[in-house]
Amino acid sequence: MLSFGKHFPLESTSASKQKMDDAFSALKEEMQSDRIGYYKLPTHSLTHLETLKTINTQSIKQIVIIGIGGSSLGIKAINSILRPYTPDVKEMLFLENSDPLTIKETMEKIRKEEACFFMISKSGSTIETTSVLKTLIAHFEIDLDGADKERLFVVTDAGSVLSDFAKHHQLHEFNIPDNVGGRFSVLSAVGVVPLAMAGYDMRALLGGAGSLIQSFFAGNENHLLEKAYWLASNSETQSINVLFSYADRLEDLTKWYVQLWGESLGKIDTNGKRVGLTPIGLIGAVDQHSFLQLIIEGPKDKSVTFITVEDFQVDLTIPDITLFGIEKTDFINSQSFNRLINAQCDATMQSVIESGVGADAIAMDKISAENIGAIMAYYELLTSLVGSMFKVNTYNQPGVELGKQILYKNLSN
Amino acid sequence: MLSFGKHFPLESTSASKQKMDDAFSALKEEMQSDRIGYYKLPTHSLTHLETLKTINTQSIKQIVIIGIGGSSLGIKAINSILRPYTPDVKEMLFLENSDPLTIKETMEKIRKEEACFFMISKSGSTIETTSVLKTLIAHFEIDLDGADKERLFVVTDAGSVLSDFAKHHQLHEFNIPDNVGGRFSVLSAVGVVPLAMAGYDMRALLGGAGSLIQSFFAGNENHLLEKAYWLASNSETQSINVLFSYADRLEDLTKWYVQLWGESLGKIDTNGKRVGLTPIGLIGAVDQHSFLQLIIEGPKDKSVTFITVEDFQVDLTIPDITLFGIEKTDFINSQSFNRLINAQCDATMQSVIESGVGADAIAMDKISAENIGAIMAYYELLTSLVGSMFKVNTYNQPGVELGKQILYKNLSN
């Protein structure tokens, strides 16, 4: 269960109501027309779970993900959050970057006979992913047409060049719907197939996401519209949105959020104006000792969303010990760390609000697949709403093309 | 060796020259008067290396750091960068946050008989650090007055309550100079003692830092003054400073930078105005697929510094394989990943500059202790310069006190 605390000061006017209604209608149209596909993934992706049952994955102990950006961030986020709470889950390794040291170190951990390899690329020609793929094929002497083909899984758009590759070698192939963009694809085959194979309860995760999306379209999540309106209408002054999560294991979720928020909303709008909101992921209590000073006393250009876990399901109490000299820390004795970290979040949130910075909160009762699904759907919907209010194309990324062209030109010579 | 590429458009006027001269003089005064101590750490901290030689650390295989913020970020950064390039280095474990899951998981990795424990806190009463300390004492039945005292190391200010604790139990104690703030303390005993014990060449690292600081005060690093001036004088429009590092292992360095930059410069200035520059750490090429779109097409509120490693000293080449369907990626065949990642940085930088965003570059010829020391000194000097131009107290953090008071009040009841 998620609960939402609202602290953004919202004035309800006919103009704000109109803007919220328009955005709601825009998303409804995207969903109903099937122009945008992520809304329906929670049911659509159930078929992948059925397909997966037909594949023998008994001998697989390691799942190697070859993907970057939208083809890895969501998988990593779910894996790192749910791992401590999921028994007997298979090892997952990630090959994302073109960093030679990381690739070499990760390759040393792969035991080919126990591994399966997921090549994930929506376009099919991502340069990091194809380069790593070639390197693995050579290094592990992977026979694409022999016994190894059973350990190769391709996740890509139907009709992509990577799909051609998969079909040519008759590899396992799962497709990403055309109408689902990379950074909105975590609940498609991209995330569902490898994570289900690893042993995560993806049915529950899809269920959590689906419930929130359904509830939103039924008109029961107005807080999302209000928050989107606040963020969009204050975007010129509060241009930086901080996601301050009070649990170490949520760090990869904040990285997933950074891509979703930054790449979707940083755009040239229909009037030719550069718009966007800058996402920042922080982890509490650690970043109280790093970034908080800037939030409290620096320019008032930020809003902060706090995410907490009410029950870590870990029993760890600060012992009732008095140490010579540091007796004044005894006020915390006999408290659980669970209470300490949440009290730190409460205190920080209060101090942020008192300093005049806009803040709100999302509380998970516990870490669960349902809750993580819901929180991901929450941020996808929020992104689409703000994008609609911004009048940008939320789902493309034209700004990164120039760099790719320059790279191609520089390396082809 | 570091090399610096300058792309920030700087107009040289008598006003800008005056401001740069003033900031240079201000830092010189801070250093000569010993009001600010970090400038002299590269020589001052050499004594710790001598002291360490007198302690028998033969049996130690694990170094457990109990510290948060300035008492861990710099140590983590150096450890994660240099580890792959340093043979036979001891394991380091970090207990920073009050997250119960992380504490429990980290404790399970500790083998008491092979471990030593560093309690690091400048003030001596950091609540996360003292709470973890108590938990370790109880869990591992650490005898503070018996055989275990040899494995306990305290790093704190002389005269702090943690120093009282160390003296009472006659533990190993190293002090942080009064005139060195937590986030500027990586080259003090905080970083030098545990990292030297782990096996890192801290003499070389201090040497790299010392050379840059000496060169700066000798007037040979004017690029630092120019960059500080550009950042300070454009702070209202380009209020976000992105550090885009093209090597996975530099991620913790960007976190160290985020604290240094955010907490030092996010302040109320002498005129009562909220000032500050928001730091963001990115890793290339990964974040080309995440954040780049926002830089290129979003609001022009950012500047970007690219950090590259010219030679990763890892031999890994993309094999000359043609895969059915994805033949168009063959332009990269037979190139090294080292070349690919640096070519990606070049292309991204060029696309950023062409979009009209200010950018500059720092290139390390290779990963080495000298280079990491120099780059840390570079950022400390840059921070002090901008702080001086901002007319703020670069070295305090008054904004975080309120949250501490609220926490104390809430938990004492």
Image (spheres, coloured by chain):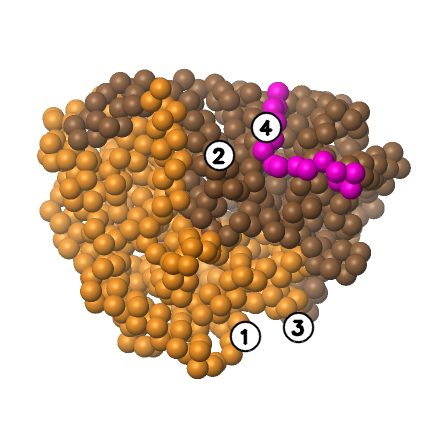
Chain colours: A brown, B orange
Residue kind at label 3, given as amino acid type: Asn
- Where does the image place residue B20, in percent across and percent down from the top left? 39, 74
Image quadrant assignment for residue B402? top left
Chain bearing tag 3 is A
Mark 2 secondary-structure assignment: helix
Identity of the amino acid at label 2? Met
Tag 2 and tag 3, C-beta contact below 8 Å: no
- For label 2, the residue is A349
Q: CA distance from mark 2 to mark 1?
A: 39 Å
Which of discs 4 and 1 lies nearer the camera? The answer is 4
- Quadrant location, the N terminus of chain B: bottom left
Residue at numbered disc 4: A5
- Which residue type carries mark 1? Pro
Whether residue A403 is visible, yes or no, is: yes
Q: Please indicate whether residue B222 sits to the left or right of residue A239 in the image.
A: left
Q: Which residue is mark 3?
A: A413
State which quarter of the image contains the C terminus of chain B.
top left
Q: Name the outermost residue toward the right.
A: A33
Image: magenta residue range? A1-16
Q: Are marks 3 and 1 on the same chain?
A: no
Labels 2, 3: front one: 2
Residue at the image position 14 percent from the left and 35 percent from the top? B164
Residue shown at the point (17%, 52%) measured from the top left: B48
**What's the CA distance linking mark 3 and mark 1?**
30 Å
Chain of the residue under the numbered disc 1 shown in the image: B
For residue B149, above or below residue A390 = above
Q: Earlier in the sequence, mark 4 or mark 2?
A: 4
Which element type, helix, strand or loop, lies under badge 1? Answer: loop
Q: Position of residue A14 (x, y in %)?
A: 79, 38
Seen at 41% across and 59% down, the residue is B271
Judge whether residue A13 is colored magenta: yes
Vertically, is B318 above or below A68?
below
